[in-house]
Amino acid sequence: MEKENNKITFEEHKQFGHLSKIFNDKLVKTAVKTSNQAKTKTEGRKITIHENESIKALTKLRDHLEEIMFKDYPDKAKTGIYYGER
C-alpha cells in the first residue's frame, strides 16, 4: 500500500507536462539565440552541444514520465500531456 501513496498523481503529470513543454521551448529558443550570438563557429558549436544535451535529457525524462502515466492511468493518459500544444 505504501508504494501506491508514492505514485505520481494524474494532476501532477498534467502540471509537470505543462511545465516541461514550456521549459523545452525555452531551451530550444535559447540554443538558437546563443549559437547565433557566438563569435566563432567553434564557440557556437560548444554552446549548442551543451544545450542539445539538456534538451535530450529533458526529452528522456518526459518519455519516462509519459510511460509511467500510461501505465498508471491508461484510461486518462494521452500523449498531449507531455508533448503537443501547451
Image (spheres, rainbow, N blue to C red):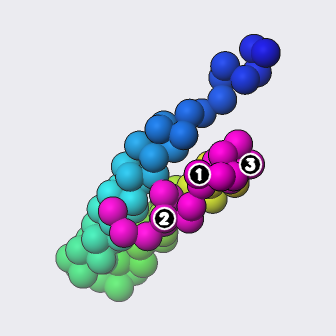
What residue is rendered at 36% in x and 69% in y? Answer: 85
Residue ID for mark 1 = 76
Checking the image for residue 80, the label placed there is 2
What is the x, y in percent for residue 68?
A: 69, 47
Which residue sits furthest bottom? 41
Q: Quadrant of residue 46?
A: bottom left
Circle nearer the N terminus (1, 3): 3
- At 75% from the left and 14% from the top, the residue drawn is 2
- Of marks 1 and 2, the one in the foreground: 1
70 above or below 79?
Answer: above
Q: Quadrant of the C terminus?
A: bottom left
Q: Is residue 25 magenta?
A: no
Where 85 sits versus 64, above or below? below
Q: Which residues are magenta?
A: 69-86
User: Which residue does the numbered mark 3 point to in the structure image?
Assistant: 71
Name the spot of residue 57 as percent of width and height, x first: 57, 57
* Amino acid bearing label 2: Gly
